[in-house]
């Protein structure tokens, strides 16, 4: 008996960890990826779109890629909105060479495939509006594309099974003391999605940082030997090198590959080992806490916008899932 695949849409800002997430989503046996939307985020849209196409070409995947929003919904309309933020852009020097955590160009050939002419938001609206069964959205960058569609036509929320979002932090943040970068890049979009009534699971930095990859994991992945595994190992090694050199997660010679945890959670929620349904919101004040995920831990908290917040991930299970997906390369890629 054939198992029914979960219909999903990826929303990425590729980026290194996004690349690993795309590979897992396209190689696994559980997901039917209807399309991939790219947005600004780790890099400008012209780079994230090209990088997304590079990864799709690596897997020879027959999946449409759409160009999404090149900037936040409203944040850039307010000059000086970030003036109160203690934003840190890490300077990375490895072996005397200045590097970026997310390089503008992934180490893959120039893409031969092309993005669809239709804008991502138009395609997303059409796909959700006329869906015959509910669809799961997996945003692993800013949620601008999804928020634009929900703002335009809130009724499409009825056809969303769930949003599994890599973003936010409770006790751990990165781009500012209060904010995780995917939320910070478009706090208004995140707030719209959280207020939409759609079921949301937030795969926070707390969860991703509890399930990190080390150099020994890189060697295990590389040993799988196929092109996808070799590329994944190279990307993860680069991420560990650069984040450790910049002291982003401490100098433990390990690093979280954030986005793939969200994809794996969409496949199997048990990879998240501490998930709490809590009242939460997003700060959009433009002050020092702009982009903060605000979780109300009080017993009397107003449950108007409850979401499922992941605090911990199973690192061993995550690694095993990623390896299992990579091992399917020969069967999936013809």
Image (tube, grey):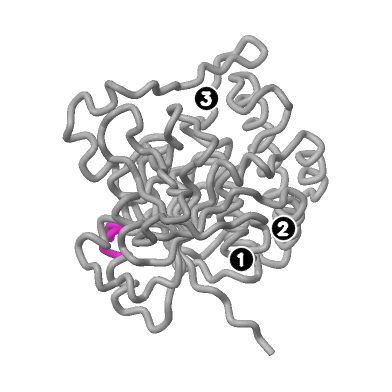
User: Quick check: 220 above or below 242?
Assistant: below
Provide residue 2's location: percent of width, then percent of height. Answer: 66, 86
Report whether 239 appears left or right of 135: right
- Give the labeled residue for mark 1: 267
Residue 277 point in image, percent of width and height: 51, 60
Who comes first in sequence, dot 3 or dot 1? Answer: 3
Whether 127 is drawn above or below 311: the answer is below
Q: Where the C terminus falls, by quadrant?
A: bottom right
Position of residue 260 measured from the top left corner of the image (x, y, whole percent): 60, 51
Based on the picture, tell me whether residue 122 belongs to the magenta stretch. yes
Q: Are marks 1 and 2 in contact (CB under 8 Å)?
A: yes
Which quarter of the picture shows residue 139? bottom left
Which is more toward the observer, 263 or 126?
A: 263
What residue is pinned by disc 3? 100
* Residue 21, image x, y percentages: 57, 51
Give 103 or 88, whichever is nearer the viewer.
88
Which residue is label 2 attached to?
Answer: 321
Label 2 SS = helix
Magenta segment boundaries in residue numbering:
117-123
Callout 3: helix, strand or loop? loop
């Amino acid at each position: 008996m054939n198992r029914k695949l979960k219909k999903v849409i990826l929303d990425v800002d590729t980026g290194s960890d996004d690349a690993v997430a795309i590979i897992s989503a396209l190689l696994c046996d559980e997901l039917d990826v209807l399309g991939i939307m790219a947005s600004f985020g780790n890099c400008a849209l012209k780079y994230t779109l090209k990088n997304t196409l590079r990864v799709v070409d690596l897997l020879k995947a027959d999946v449409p890629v759409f160009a999404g929003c090149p900037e936040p919904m409203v944040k850039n309309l307010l000059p000086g909105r970030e003036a109160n933020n203690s934003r840190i852009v890490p300077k990375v020097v490895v072996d005397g060479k200045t590097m970026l955590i997310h390089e503008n160009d992934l180490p893959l050939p120039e893409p031969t495939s092309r993005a669809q002419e239709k804008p991502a938001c138009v395609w997303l609206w059409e796909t959700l509006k006329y869906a015959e069964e509910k669809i799961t959205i997996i945003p692993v960058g800013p949620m601008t594309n999804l928020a634009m569609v929900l703002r335009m036509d809130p009724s499409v929320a009825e056809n969303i099974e769930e949003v599994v979002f890599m973003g936010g932090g409770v006790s751990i943040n990165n781009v500012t003391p209060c904010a995780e970068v995917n939320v910070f890049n478009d706090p208004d979009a995140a707030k719209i999605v959280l207020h939409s009534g759609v079921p949301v699971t937030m795969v926070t930095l707390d969860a991703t940082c509890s399930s990190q990859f080390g150099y020994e994991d890189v060697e295990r992945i590389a040993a799988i030997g196929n092109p996808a595994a070799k590329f994944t190992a190279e990307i993860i090694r680069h991420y560990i090198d650069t984040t450790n050199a910049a002291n982003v997660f401490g100098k433990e010679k390990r690093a979280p590959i954030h986005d793939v945890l969200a994809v794996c959670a969409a496949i199997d929620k048990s990879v998240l080992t501490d998930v709490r349904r809590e009242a939460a919101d997003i700060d959009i004040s433009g002050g020092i806490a702009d982009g903060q995920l605000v979780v109300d831990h009080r017993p009397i908290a107003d449950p108007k916008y409850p979401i499922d917040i992941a605090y911990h991930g199973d690192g061993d299970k995550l690694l095993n899932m990623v390896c299992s997906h990579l091992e399917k390369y020969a069967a999936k890629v013809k």
